Amino acid sequence: MRLLAPAKINLHLRVGSPRADGFHPLVTWMCTVSLFDELYLEESQSVVGWSLTSNHADLACDQSNLVLKAAILLETAAGRKWEKRRPPGGVAALHKRIPIGAGLGGGSSDGARMLLGLNRLWDAGLSAEELSPLAAQLGSDVPFFLFGPSNICRGRGEIVAPIAKPAVRWAILILPSQAIATPGVYKRLDLLNDWSVNKPRSDDENNEPRLREPDWTNWTLLPAQQLLTMLVNDLEPPAFDVAPELAYLRDTAEQVIQRVVRMSGSGSTLFSLFDQLPEAQAAAKEIKENLSVGAQVVELAPDINDDLNKT
Ligand code: C5P
């Protein structure tokens, strides 16, 4: 079985002060983009459990990988009605294209695709809604990838509601080589906001007006330049504090392409939006030539033609 696991960008990301469990309440508009990891699954009668190989030297292929965690979760999930019909294990091969630690959700997408793939292979018949609590155990962003391509995510990210695809069709991803670890960015956010446990405030006081939501339907209709001026990512200040060179890259990228540039998730990927493909291609070329950094044009909310979409 061949599966394509898309990357995502957070078009808009507002983050409130930490909850009692340490996670931060957030509201985000997430959208898949046409940058894919490829995941191949082959069942086998002769092995018990799943193993993973990858083309990426830095990727752990042990049980810390979300692909294998997903297999274990689904296996041990309640209601094993499909168990007798399936071979005991198999081999998963992951071809990484989505950079790691880039705010593009690559690992989360791989994990979600594994859940969907095994659900199909095992004929388990679970809906995306039924898989969602399992996905949430893998990570806050994982449920989004069960649904896609365009969703508003709330809670710690795991509460997913569909929204129309944006009218804007193209984005450029600016891909710095450094990875940024998400927990460190949230910790820095807490430091910058002085949300210390010694100063408890009610959730409303803490999080308003950050978590107040715009008219999303209106936003889905906006052309690129207008939409860009509305977008906020509350993780930019802490990420730029952790990695000051990223702030410099954002400022210079905005000058080079004369357009708003935002960060996705907890970084390090930066992006901008375009209505027309040739404009996006020209901007990516300018960025690569002037700033010596990777830049790639992607389609927002692309169709995904893999084996999950065959009947
Ligand atoms: O859920 P996930 O494993 O992706 O989260 C990684 C880390 O990011 C968490 O351990 C936490 O430090 C931080 N996080 C957070 N609030 C969120 C999502 C993630 O503080 N809503």
Image (spheres, helix red, strand yellow):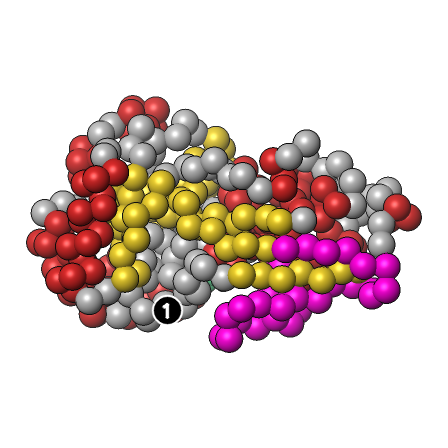
108 sits left or right of 279 in the view: right
Q: Nearer the viewer, residue 99 or 183?
A: 99
Q: Is residue 221 visible?
A: yes
Q: Is residue 66 magenta?
A: yes
Q: Is residue 228 visible?
A: no
Residue drawn at the location 44% of the way across and 58% of the way down: 98
Residue drawn at the location 44% of the way across and 65% of the way down: 100
40 sits left or right of 107 in the view: right
Q: Is residue 37 magenta?
A: no
Q: Which residue is mark 1?
A: 179
Please tell me whether mark 1 sits on a helix, a strand or a loop: loop
Residue drawn at the location 67% of the way across and 60% of the way down: 92
Q: Is residue 160 above or below residue 76?
A: above
Query: Percent from the top left, x then y, of residue 73?
Result: 71, 55
- Which corner quadrant of the image does residue 196 belong to? bottom left
CB of mark 1 near ligand 1 (< 8 Å): no
Q: Is residue 241 above or below residue 117?
A: below
Query: Percent from the top left, x then y, of residue 40?
Result: 63, 55
211 sits left or right of 19 in the view: left
Which amino acid does the dot numbered 1 rest on?
Ala
Residue drawn at the location 19% of the way across and 67% of the way down: 292
Query: Percent from the top left, x then y, of residue 310?
Result: 64, 35
Q: What segment carries the magenta color?
A: 40-67
Q: Is residue 24 above or below residue 153?
A: below
- Which corner quadrant of the image does residue 32 belong to? top left
Circle 1 Cα neighbour tier, 10 Å, few/some/many (<14 / 14–19 / ≥20): some
Q: Nearer the viewer, residue 260 or 172?
A: 172
